[in-house]
Image: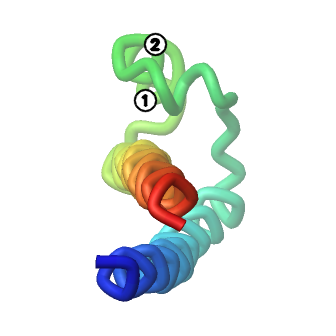
Amino acid sequence: MFTLLISLVIGLFIAMLFLNLYFRAKVLKTYQQLVKNRVEFGAAHVFNKQKMAEEVIPKYPHMQKQIETFASHMQYSIKMATVLITLITLFGGILMYYR
């Protein structure tokens, strides 16, 4: 049981690392396009689709797909990281209990 839990924690840590690198590459690619076209918006816009649609998209209609892709990747990356961190913490707690 102990070996299985250690393996799960190590596997989840590696998964979180690769997931982070994968989404970082995707986000940076889209971010470079947005910077090149001088698209500006804040963190509040990334997490609020309605605010993004009302305030940012009308200013940059030609970059709508890139803006939405960037926001989507940021939200998904944060959700996945939260889930993996929670799982790692949970398994770490179980390991401390059984040790």
Whether residue 10 is visible, yes or no, is yes
Q: Is residue 39 left or right of residue 5?
A: right
Whether residue 62 is visible, yes or no, is no
From this view, report whether residue 85 is shown above or below residue 43: below
**Image location of residue 21, percent across then percent down:** 55, 81
Q: Which residue is mark 1?
A: 57
Near-viewer residue (87 or 77): 87
Which color mode does the image show?
rainbow
Outermost residue toward the front in this view: 99
Near-viewer residue (84 or 66): 84
Q: Quadrant of the N terminus?
A: bottom left
Residue at left offset 64%, top offset 70%: 32
- Residue type at mark 2 is Lys
Q: Which residue is mark 2?
A: 51
Query: Considering only order in the chain, which callout, 2 or 1, is on the residue closer to the N terminus?
Result: 2
On the image, which quarter does residue 58 sit in? top left
From this view, report whether residue 1 is shown above or below residue 84: below
* Helix, strand or loop under label 1: loop
Residue at left offset 65%, top offset 30%: 43
Residue at left offset 57%, top offset 58%: 96
Residue at left offset 64%, top offset 45%: 39
Q: CA distance from mark 1 to mark 2?
A: 9 Å
* Helix, strand or loop under label 2: helix
**Nearest-to-viewer mark from 1 and 2:** 2
Residue 73 marker: none
On the image, which quarter does residue 57 sit in? top left
- Residue type at mark 1 is Ile
Near-viewer residue (32 or 85): 85
